[in-house]
């Protein structure tokens, strides 16, 4: 379905950020400007917008590629312009971009309203993710685990740990995380070897990304986050479908579990270790 004559599609730039933020707020989604900026950075990320004759953004969508694994996100159409082919045009452009960047496995987080659009493009439900809300005072069994803030010098070591577990090279977003003093990145080591890490985000009351080789390492990282955030009573983690054992262990430590069946994928699965993933970044970034 082609776009109406008065609408056109183009790449987004930083000048579109205020309108992108406005659209996210209009559907009740959290706004993280750092995450929106991340999908504007070439060559592995791109954001598309549909604009009217006055260059007002009426639809948006983004893609970011981590090698063979790509994520679609920020898919929003202004309420007054829905059912005009805007979402389909943006999604097709995002898919084309990610494919050109070499991504063969595409994933996204879909609202119930958006699932038919993605299904028409070959996306299928993967299985229920789990939101875990952990209370302050969880029983942390961190024997032998050393926790420390890390800076830019740890990037290569962190990427080497992260990539085989996540399924792609996230150096482009891990680098600014390591430089962000307001949101410390804590690395867990045992006998000097990385066994997990977590990005503490005071603005979101959550830890993520968070990867850990065991639930005990994940709990130790959450415990450290509580130490850094004394005003919070709870912190949230978002676990993928293949980390059910981790979710069950966190429930034993007092976590409240909520299943959410909105994750969708297209294409062959990439090698990864989702049983080590306890927290994603945001939906648009994986």
Image (cartoon, helix red, strand yellow):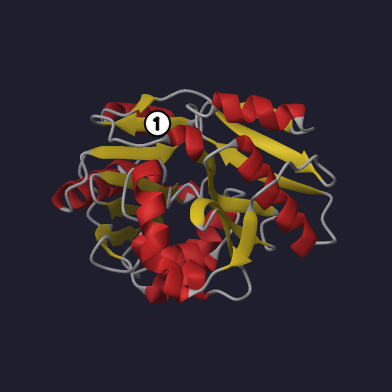
- The reply to whether residue 260 is in sight is no
Residue 11: x percent and y percent?
27, 65
215 vs 264, nearest the viewer: 215
Q: What residue does disc 1 label?
A: 264
Residue drawn at point x = 62 percent, y = 44 percent? 217
Q: Which residue is at the front of the view, 169 or 223? A: 223
**Of 127 and 189, the residue lying toward us:** 189
Badge 1 crowding class, 10 Å Cα cut-off, few under 14, some 14 to 19, many 20 or more, is: many
The location of residue 270, given as percent across then percent down, is 28, 35
**Residue 190: percent from the left, percent from the top?**
56, 51
Tell me the residue at 79%/32% (across/down). Answer: 254
Work out which quarter of the rendered image holds the N terminus and state it.
top left
Q: In the rendered view, does 112 fall on the left or right side of 253?
A: left
Above or below for 5 versus 91: below
Q: Which is nearer the eye, 12 or 227?
A: 227
Q: Name the residue located 16 percent from the left edge and 48 percent from the top edge.
A: 102
Q: Is residue 27 left or right of residue 252?
A: left
* Residue at the extreme front of the image, as rendered: 191
Would you identify the image quadrant in which residue 119 lies? top left
- Give the mark count: 1
The image quadrant that residue 16 belongs to is: bottom left
Identify the residue at the far left of this view.
100
Residue 78 lies left or right of residue 84; in this view the side is right
Q: Secondary structure at mark 1?
A: strand
Residue name at image x 34 percent, y 44 percent: 164
Examine the rendering and report whether any part of residue 213 can be seen.
yes
Where is residue 158 drawn, in percent x and y?
A: 42, 59
């Amino acid at each position: 379905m082609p776009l109406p004559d008065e609408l056109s599609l183009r790449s987004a730039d930083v000048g579109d950020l205020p309108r992108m933020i406005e659209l996210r707020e209009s559907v009740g989604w959290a706004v993280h400007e750092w995450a929106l900026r991340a999908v504007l950075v070439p060559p592995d990320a791109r954001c598309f917008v549909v604009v009217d004759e006055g260059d007002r953004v009426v639809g948006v969508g983004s893609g970011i590629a981590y090698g063979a694994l790509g994520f679609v996100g920020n898919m929003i159409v202004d309420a007054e312009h829905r059912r005009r082919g805007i979402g389909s045009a943006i999604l097709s452009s995002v898919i084309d971009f990610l494919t050109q960047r070499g991504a063969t496995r595409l994933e996204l987080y879909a609202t119930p309203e958006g699932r038919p659009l993605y299904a028409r493009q070959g996306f299928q439900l993967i299985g229920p993710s789990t939101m875990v809300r952990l209370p302050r005072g969880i029983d942390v069994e961190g024997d032998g685990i050393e926790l420390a803030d890390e800076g830019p010098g740890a990037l290569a070591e962190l990427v080497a740990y992260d990539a085989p577990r996540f399924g792609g090279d996230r150096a482009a977003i891990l680098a600014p995380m390591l430089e962000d003093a307001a949101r410390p990145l804590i690395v867990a080591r045992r006998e000097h070897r990385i066994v997990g890490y977590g990005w503490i985000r005071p603005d979101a009351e959550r830890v993520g990304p968070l990867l850990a080789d065991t639930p005990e390492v994940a709990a130790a990282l959450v415990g450290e986050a509580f130490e850094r955030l004394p005003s919070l009573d709870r912190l949230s983690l978002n676990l993928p479908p293949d980390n059910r054992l981790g979710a069950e262990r966190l429930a034993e430590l007092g976590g409240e579990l909520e299943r959410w069946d909105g994750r969708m994928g297209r294409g062959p699965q990439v090698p990864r270790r989702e049983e080590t993933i306890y927290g994603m970044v945001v939906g648009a970034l994986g």
